[in-house]
Image: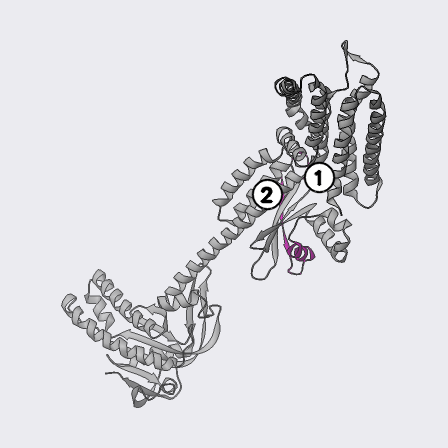
Amino acid sequence: RHPSLQAVPYILSTIMVVPVQIFYPGPLFSQVYKFVLFYAVISVLALISSVLRAFFSRESVLARERAKVVLFGSVLALPVPAAAPFLASTGSTVGGVNIITNFSSIPMVIFPASIAYAIAKHNLFDVDVYIKRAVGYVLMTALVGVSYFAIQLVVRNVILKPVFGGLEESISQVLFAVLVVLILSGPISRKIQDRVDKLFFRMRVNYRDTVISVSKALSSMLKLDDIIGRIISTVRAEMFIDSAGIILLNPQNRYARGTFVFDSEKPGGDALSREVCLLPDDSLIHLMAAEKKILTLFDIEEDPCYASCRDECRQRFTEMHASLVIPLIYQNELTGVLALGNKKSGHFYSREDIDLLNTLAGQGAVAVENARLAEQMKEEEMKRTHLSRYLSPHVVDQIMQRDVQVNLAGNRKVVTVLFSDIRHFTRIAESFPPDRLVELLNEYFTEMADIVFRFRGSLDKYIGDAIVAVFGSLIPLESPEKNAALAAGEMMKRLAQLNEGWKERFGLELAIGIGINTGEVFLGTVGAPQRMEFAVIGDPVNVAARLSGLAAGGQILITRETMSGLNSGIRCNQLPSTEIKGKTGKMEIFEVLYA
């Protein structure tokens, strides 16, 4: 509640250390020293009582474990340096040298205490840590001692003695005492502790290389499976975790699917993997989306804030073999969850572990989003290519920009079908070189398709020399009948222009007949899984094909259904009713006049 109170012990220590050094070894020293000892005893008892209270408290399992670690670390590192003042007061010697209560004991206290605190803070008791850093302990202890005496020697002989003369002894003791108290307090102490962490434990220095390597790897990955595998393998290898998994939310319906890797129960067995699927109303996903912060199983079990969803979240943690979950946040939205099991050493995650995990989660969220964008771009490009086979580039752009909605899944709809066929094409094909024929047809199809697209129609298919176009299918039109009739007229006019050039280049002219009909058809994607196509299926298509066969070269025939949708701007002549193959009775037929 009052963070400023943390400075009170350091202020009292600074106030007490000055008279201790000034009055030593005078008669007032013993009085001050007794007060200092009383203060030290009270401080130690307060520390021990608070730790024991946490240890025996039933409110928090996590607090008990931390208290146990602190007690063990203190017993491990503090007894020897703490005995120095007692041995000095009793006149004890080590190797024939008297132990003097002065600041030569400071390194003996500061360094082991720092190591003990680091051990307690990071919960590191792995055997490999001791083996790898045993030499470092010895070297660092010697370095601290030599550095202290060197600084003390330089300050006393170069600065204090020339200035204060005989008073330099007393002043140096007071100065160094105050300096030590300041070093042990506030930001300076934390910086020193961080240095010890970096030198002796698997902290940020080692993690930095991991972050850099993972960042480089993720930046080059555009497949979700590769990204998930890299993150899981990294956290399991770097932190020795028994299980890890990533749950990704589907952006459309918000369901979540996850992949988990965990150790085999058989000694030496390969790691196992499995997938889980979470429903949109999953309590843990809702909680992570709301909190957007790291949650542990202890948080769920102990914090009253989570009482309403405790059972569901605890069950989810159990199913995932997780003890900690980290949100993947992109643009302040939850995109996934990184779920981790227990460390194989049995210890809790340290602050530096959490820092690394937060960094990996942030990079992972960006990598996942990049992969999704890449997949989306790939799908849109495939969709664009698919639509370009039927629609004009302008209409395709409108569809891709969501300005026009289309349904490729399949439905029934009233449309107008245009069927165009080249007259006497079989005879032309028999007498014309194949390569020249393909050149002619490609030029013909290109010109006719441009006209269909110009009048907002779509190309259904090419059947040999025939063109099947549909109006009012993918793109809603006010009058599909009018668009089809106008397109047919333009096709006839453009063919006349093309024939002028083809007569010189190929020595022939083409003539086409066009049939147009309106009716209800099925629109959708049909075919085998190996090859799917968008198609228009129904009797109106067959009728349009029959009319095309009846039409003479240069003639456009339409049915009564199509005629009913035309306005006065298009001139038509009614022809005698005609029997159509496959239809009962005679059908009314009209000719569109386009000249």
Relative side of 552 to 286, left or right: left
Mark number, residue 348: 1
**How far across and down, in percent of the image, does residue 2 sit?**
75, 46
For the view shown, which residue lies furthest in the top direction?
Answer: 96
Which kind of residue does numbered mark 2 sit on?
Ile
Above-or-below relation of 57 to 521: above
Relative side of 375 to 20, left or right: left
From which residue to which does the magenta span run?
264-291
The residue beneath circle 2 is: 232
**How far across and down, in percent of the image, does residue 81 sit?**
76, 23
- Packing grade of label 2 (10 A; few <14, some 14-19, many >=20) is many
Residue found 43% across the figure and 62% down from its top: 383
Which kind of residue does numbered mark 1 sit on?
Phe
Residue found 82% across the figure and 14% down from its top: 91
Indicate whether residue 274 is drawn in magenta.
Answer: yes
Check whether the beta carbons of the residues at disc 1 and disc 2 lie within 8 A of each other.
Answer: no
Q: Quadrant of residue 304?
A: bottom right
- Packing grade of label 1 (10 A; few <14, some 14-19, many >=20) is some
In this rendered view, identify the residue nearer to me: 265 or 570: 570
Q: Secondary structure at mark 2?
A: helix
Color style of the picture = one colour
Q: Secondary structure at mark 1?
A: loop
